[in-house]
Image (cartoon, rainbow, N blue to C red):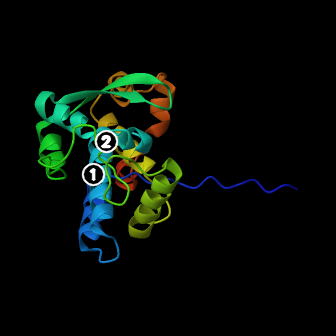
Amino acid sequence: MKESKIKKIRENITEVEFQKLLTYLRGSEILNKNTKINFTRTFTLLYFTGCRLNEIKQLKIKDIKTIFSSEELIILTPKTNKERKLFFSKNAIKEIKKCFELKNLDDNDFIIGTKGDYSKVPSDITYITAINKFIQKVLGERYSSHSFRSGLITDMSKTINAKFIKEFIGHSDISTTMRYIKPTDSDLRGCLIR
């Protein structure tokens, strides 16, 4: 009889895990300065936007300036080849500003660079692997960069209509959005009635 593959539980990245990643990142003596900058920018934008990693990688300095000036940004989603509008709270902008020293950067530089060169980005597979390896080292094997997206959607689902979340996150079908909602252990414990 053929063994079926076990589908493992994937955990969400919420504020607690996000802060743990940033703390570990700041204290790491193994990672070089450029990697720390890339990872800090990536984690911060993933946390506040629920974007996919390849959406973050395509951003340029001019996009960050647009966020700071208008509190929103239209991006192209490579997965679906559709535009998506991102919105940013005052708190999100404050945290994103901590990741960028814009004085010496060109508007067309990418926000994620290769070996300190921000005119080019690392390959998708290289960067995704590096990010996920770091996340799993700090948080455990049940986490990945996509855990940021799932965490944001789950947090939003507690107070916001799923139709609004669908639009915010850029899904074309609400059933996709619903699959992302993963209650935390404390959410499930709160369901106990006996």
Name the disc covering residue 30, or none: none
Q: Name the amino acid, label 2.
A: Asp
**Residue 175 rendering spot, x and y as whole percentages:** 50, 27
The residue closer to the viewer here, 113 or 143, is 113
How many numbered discs sit on the rendered protein? 2
Compared with residue 160, is residue 109 higher up or lower down, i.e. above or below? below
Instruction: Name the side, left or right, on which 117 lies relative to 106.
Output: right
Instruction: Name the side, left or right, on which 57 lies relative to 94.
Output: right
Residue positioned 22% across, 35% down in the render: 62
- Quarter location, residue 117: bottom left
Considering the numbered disc 2 on the image, is that residue within a helix, a strand or a loop?
Answer: helix
Residue positioned 66% across, 55% down in the render: 6
Instruction: Name the side, left or right, on which 86 lies relative to 134.
Output: left
Residue positioned 29% across, 39% down in the render: 60
Considering the numbered disc 1 on the image, is that residue within a helix, a strand or a loop?
Answer: helix
Residue positioned 43% across, 69% down in the render: 137
Residue tagged 2: 155
In this orientation, does residue 143 appear? no
The residue closer to the viewer here, 48 or 115, is 115
Q: Name the amino acid, label 1.
A: Arg
Image quadrant in which the N terminus is located: bottom right
Q: Residue furthest bottom?
A: 29
Name the disc covering residue 41, or none: 1
Q: Which badge, 2 or 1, comes first in the chain's sequence?
A: 1
